[in-house]
Image (spheres, helix red, strand yellow):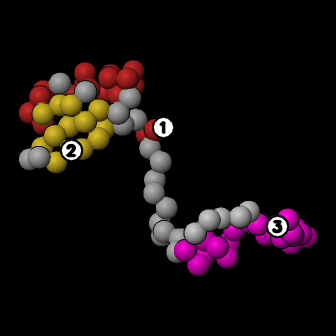
Amino acid sequence: MIWQVTDAKAQLPEILERVSEEGPQIVTHRDKRYVILAEDDYVPLPEKKMGFVDYLLNGPRFDGVEIERDKSPMRDIEL
């Protein structure tokens, strides 16, 4: 449910009850949206995003994996 900040101030206990029963609630203030959720539902963002190169370097290792090219003839295409 979406709450206006003035309603949220007056009905904070109801909002907290709905958070525990229904999940996150949205409060709007000056055209911005804020989410109220239970601590158990909160997952913090990682401190630093991993760059693409770091992602590739820290990925799974393929040591011992053999990759072979398919040697079957290509299909004919009309140009």
Q: For mark 2, does the 10 Å Cα neighbourhood hold few (<14), some (14 to 19), or many (20 or more) residues?
A: some
| Sequence order check, earlier mark of 2 and 1 | 2
Judged by depth in the image, the label closer to the viewer, 3 or 1, is 3
Q: Secondary structure at mark 2?
A: strand
| Residue drawn at 76 percent across, 66 percent down | 74
| Residue drawn at 25 percent across, 27 percent down | 1
* Residue at mark 1: 40
* Residue at mark 3: 73
- State the image quarter where residue 59 is shown: bottom right
| Residue drawn at 62 percent across, 65 percent down | 78
| Sequence order check, earlier mark of 3 and 1 | 1
Question: As rendered, which of 22 and 13 lies closer to the eye?
Answer: 22
User: Mark 2 to mark 3: distance in Å?
Assistant: 58 Å
Look at label 2 and name its amino acid.
Answer: Arg
* Residue occupying the far front of the picture: 78
Q: Which residues are magenta?
A: 52-74
> Where is residue 79 drawn, in percent x and y?
58, 69
Q: Is 70 contained in the magenta span?
A: yes
User: Mark 2 to mark 1: distance in Å?
Assistant: 21 Å
Classify residue 21 as left or right of residue 5.
Answer: right
Label total for image: 3
